[in-house]
Amino acid sequence: MSLTEHLSELVGKPVAAFDGRAPFDLRAKVPRLSIDWDSHVDGLGMSDLVGELLRRPDVASVEGLVFGVWDFISAADASAIVAPLCAAKDRLPALRAIFLGDILESEQELAWIKQGDVAPLFAAFPKLTELRVRGSAGLRLAPLG
């Protein structure tokens, strides 16, 4: 994983930017969901992108997901991604690889990437064999206590 280039391949498929508007073949490519500054200013967030992805008729074929910047201001942790994914587990039966934090140094300070509890992903997605995480602030792989 490079800090100067986005991931180009996951689960043997090319990774491509997913904006929710342009046509996207979920069977042939792995979507990379990321919020840029202009989207943020327009009031669009990661939940909007995830919602657009989940509305696609071929979403059940998704084997991999890549997440870039999900927040600019509030320093929200990855629960902004983990919770909606887990809630939609029945729509993503083939999911086997996730990368949380495909964020470059030029996009966001790496120390600002907050992860949180990613353990629910393992229970929600039994086919998950690969979980990549960049940023470790608050990272938990098991419940506290």
Image (cartoon, grey):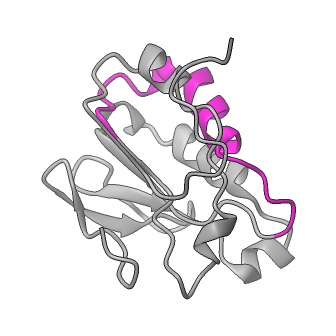
In this rendering, is residue 79 above or below 47?
Answer: above
Q: Is residue 93 magenta?
A: yes
Q: Position of residue 5 (x, y in %)?
A: 35, 81
* Span highlighted in magenta in the image: 73-97
The number of discs equals: 0
Closer to the camera in the image, 109 or 16: 109
Residue at position x 62%, y 47% in the image: 115
Residue at position x 71%, y 43% in the image: 80
Quadrant where the image shows the N terminus: bottom left
In this rendering, is residue 53 above or below 54?
Answer: below
Closer to the camera in the image, 50 or 127: 127
Q: Is residue 99 magenta?
A: no
Q: Viewed as shown, does residue 125 lie left or right of 105?
A: left
Closer to the camera in the image, 21 or 107: 107
Closer to the camera in the image, 108 or 9: 108
Q: Viewed as shown, does residue 10 lie left or right of 144?
A: left
In the rendered image, the residue lying farthest to the left is 12
In this rendering, is residue 57 above or below 135?
Answer: above
Residue at position x 33%, y 16% in the image: 126
In this rendering, is residue 23 above or below 38?
Answer: above
Q: Position of residue 26 (x, y in %)?
A: 32, 49
Residue at position x 87%, y 60% in the image: 74
Q: Position of residue 145 (x, y in %)?
A: 68, 11
Q: Position of residue 17 (x, y in %)?
A: 43, 69
Q: Quadrant of residue 64?
A: top left
Q: Viewed as shown, does residue 14 lie left or right of 42?
A: left
